[in-house]
């Protein structure tokens, strides 16, 4: 099943037209009208509405509908990482939108910064891409049961060339990263450079990392500098930095992953939900063997 994401300017109008043309794409919730569907889309979970197991020209697809505003906000601020995380991986853009393109450049740059902050001084391209690809799965209950435990490695190993194409330009532009031979890289451990990366974390993660560092400093009798630049450098050098990052990702992702999955029961209907869950569990069980 191929996944599509449709970013639309006016979800209510889009659903109204789509329900007229393709009522069979929707579960029984369509009887409540496009306004109810849009309300469910916007207010529950990650702001996206999925219709799975749709047959188009002999192909089975799953498509999600999200407002352009909601999509761009997640790409920039990482409110849920549900959509931003998908865009960390290589995807095919069918229709280019300037706002989304610019927002996603911010998103990809932020993913690189977060990965670098949790990697050692020397690392490989594959380690970097695995870290980036894993960001949006932290705290997702489906990675415990329902998803192939090797999903991240499989995504990266099968698309190394596409990951390289997606991120090489960004890495080449970073003054604190040197590209070595044979897929190896090195980053500067200069506190000033690393402090700047902390300063430029996506808004939702930035707030959480600072809160966690203040709590850690209080528990360990560490004085917090008043100068924010010095504070960023202190955070960047903290032995607990990777813990801050992983905990922040979990806080961002866990709740949305649950509510979005619960919403899927309503939007897909019980039959399609059962089929989808069965296929996921089958893949998970095969991978565990």
Image: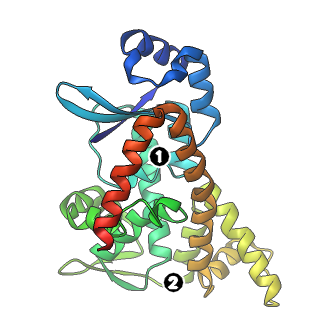
Determine the secondary structure under disc 1: loop
Q: Secondary structure at mark 2?
A: loop
Q: Is residue 254 above or below residue 52?
A: below
**Image-quadrant location for residue 170:** bottom left
Q: Choose between 281 and 125: the one closer to the eye.
A: 281
Q: Residue at x 62, y 66 (%)?
A: 248
Q: In x, y percent, where is residue 200?
A: 57, 62
Q: Nearer the viewer, residue 22 or 102?
A: 22
Residues 235 and 49: in front is 49
Residue beneath disc 2: 190
Residue 83 is tagged as 1
Picture residue at 22% right of the left edge, 57% below the top:
162
Q: Quick one: 16 or 77, which is closer to the camera?
A: 16
Q: Whole-percent x and y of residue 24?
A: 38, 19
Mark pair 1, 2: CA separation:
32 Å
Indicate whether 27 appears above or below 202.
above
Q: In the image, which is nearer the foreground, mark 1 or mark 2?
A: 1
- Residue 157 x %, y %: 22, 68
């Amino acid at each position: 099943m191929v996944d599509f994401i449709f970013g639309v300017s006016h979800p209510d109008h889009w659903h109204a037209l789509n329900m007229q043309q393709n009522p069979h794409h929707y579960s029984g919730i369509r009887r409540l009208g496009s306004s109810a569907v849009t309300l469910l889309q916007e207010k529950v979970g990650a702001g996206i509405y999925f219709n799975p197991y749709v047959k188009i020209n002999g192909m089975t697809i799953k498509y999600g509908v999200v407002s352009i505003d909601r999509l761009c906000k997640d790409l920039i601020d990482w409110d849920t990482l549900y959509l931003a995380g998908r865009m960390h991986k290589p995807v095919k853009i069918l229709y280019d939108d300037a706002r989304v393109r610019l927002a996603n450049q911010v998103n990809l740059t932020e993913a690189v910064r977060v990965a670098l902050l949790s990697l050692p001084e020397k690392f490989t391209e594959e380690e970097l891409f695995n870290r980036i690809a894993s960001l949006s799965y932290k705290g997702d209950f489906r990675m415990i049961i329902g998803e192939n435990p090797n999903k991240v490695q499989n995504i990266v190993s099968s698309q190394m060339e596409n990951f390289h194409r997606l991120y090489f330009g960004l890495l080449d532009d970073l003054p604190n990263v040197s590209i070595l031979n044979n897929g190896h890289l090195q980053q500067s451990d200069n506190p000033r450079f690393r402090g700047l990366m902390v300063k430029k974390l996506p808004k939702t993660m930035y707030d959480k990392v600072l809160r966690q560092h203040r709590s850690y400093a209080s528990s360990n009798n560490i004085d917090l500098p008043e100068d924010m630049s010095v504070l960023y450098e202190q955070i960047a050098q903290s032995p607990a930095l990777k813990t801050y990052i992983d905990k922040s990702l979990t806080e961002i992702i866990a709740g949305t992953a649950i509510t979005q999955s619960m919403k899927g029961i309503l939007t897909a209907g019980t039959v399609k939900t059962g089929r989808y869950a069965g296929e996921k569990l089958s893949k998970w069980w095969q991978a565990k063997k």
